[in-house]
Image (cartoon, rainbow, N blue to C red):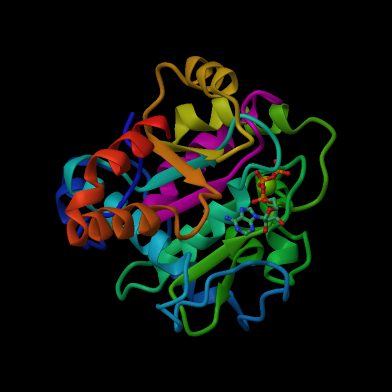
Amino acid sequence: MPLLTARDTESPRNTASAVTAPDPSPADLSVLDQVEEISFSPAPESHLLRLDHPQETPSEEFRSLRTKLNHMQTLQNLHSLIVTSPSPAEGKSFTAVNLALAQAHLADNPTLLVDLDLRRPVMHNLFQLDRSPGMTDYLLGKEPLHRVMKKVAGTNLYVIPAGSSVKNPLELLNLREVRTLFSQLPSLFNWVIMDTPPILFSADSNLLSTLADGTILVIRIGETTIDSVTRAMQTLCENNVLGIVANGARAGELYYKYTYYYARHEEPEEEDEAVEDEEKD
Ligand SMILES: Nc1ncnc2c1ncn2[C@@H]1O[C@H](COP(=O)(O)OP(=O)(O)OP(=O)(O)O)[C@@H](O)[C@H]1O
Ligand SMILES: [Mg+2]
């Protein structure tokens, strides 16, 4: 299972996969012309990336993740992906929104962020939108697609909030309309990134991962247990899990190791002791 880390190839709007992925029912491209624009004014505590400040972490981490995924897109049909994690509060929404922002920052890379966590949706809060109209309203035939979607002004990012609350999300996600939407959205967007509930707490994510081209599993360092990762992977067994995002690694941990080796090079007489210390870690 690869960790999704940095690669150096950027390839928005990959044509190879577009050629090998026939879309039997492409969506009407004029939909996007009718979408309302919203200003980008994230809630102060939202931890949304500011890509105009590239020196700030975790911008760099999300650019690396973006690069890795764009490279994967050159190798396989990969336009829709779901973001899930074994348990609550491990950083699914944080990862989904920041990855979408990072993708949308590239030119010619239209990106859609969909809140498919119909149980604890947050995207409307992060973008300071109303929760509805949104995805549930579209799926129930109450709103057309262009009405439930918003475009973040000045970017390539489109957002669909969760929509009106429904009693049984899983039943809704089993509708044929969901499959149809999954087959149509890639004709409008290069990336469709979906936030979903924790996989060990509802069947929604597992169902959605069978429809998406790929799945990203988020784990939170120091909180997610090996047992829950194992169970999550077993649940996702036949689905295309692209890799694991390790969320919450302490900044500086890697730098410490590199600094350490560099220092040892400067002071060879302490080498034996230093090696022993490292092995104890
Ligand atoms: N790497 C991070 N750095 C700073 N804050 C983070 C990080 N990851 C997550 N958070 C914060 O932790 C909280 C929980 O994260 P998030 O909402 O993304 O988790 P979740 O897995 O989507 O939770 P839920 O299961 O409720 O949907 C949020 O306030 C989020 O902003
Ligand atoms: Mg969430």
Image-based side of 66 in relation to 134, left or right: left
Q: Residue at x 52, y 67 (%)?
A: 158
Location of the N terminus by quadrant is top left
Q: Position of residue 17 (x, y in %)?
A: 20, 46
Q: Is residue 187 visible?
A: no
| Residue 202: quadrant of the picture | top right
Q: Is residue 98 magenta?
A: no
Residue at the (57%, 38%) spot, across then down: 177
Find residue 250 and report its horizontal and vertical position in percent: 52, 54
Circle count = 0
Bounds of the magenta span?
175-204
Residue 145: where, in percent of width, then height?
A: 59, 58
- Viewed as shown, does residue 117 lie left or right of 52? right
- In the displayed structure, 84 sits above or below 105; it is above
| Quarter location, residue 219 | top right
Vertical relation: 122 (above or below) 32 = above
Compared to residue 78, the image places residue 133 above or below, namely: below
Closer to the camera in the image, 106 or 32 = 106
Identify whether 13 is placed above or below 18.
Answer: below
Q: Nearer the viewer, residue 200 or 77?
A: 200
Where, quadrant-wise, is the C terminus in this rendering?
Answer: top left
What percent of the width, then of the height, locates residue 173? 64, 33
Q: Is residue 137 visible?
A: yes
Q: Is residue 189 magenta?
A: yes
Q: Is residue 140 left or right of residue 279?
A: right
Q: Residue at x 78, y 66 (%)?
A: 130
Task: Single out the residue that lies furthest toward the front.
Answer: 269
Q: Residue at x 54, y 22 (%)?
A: 226
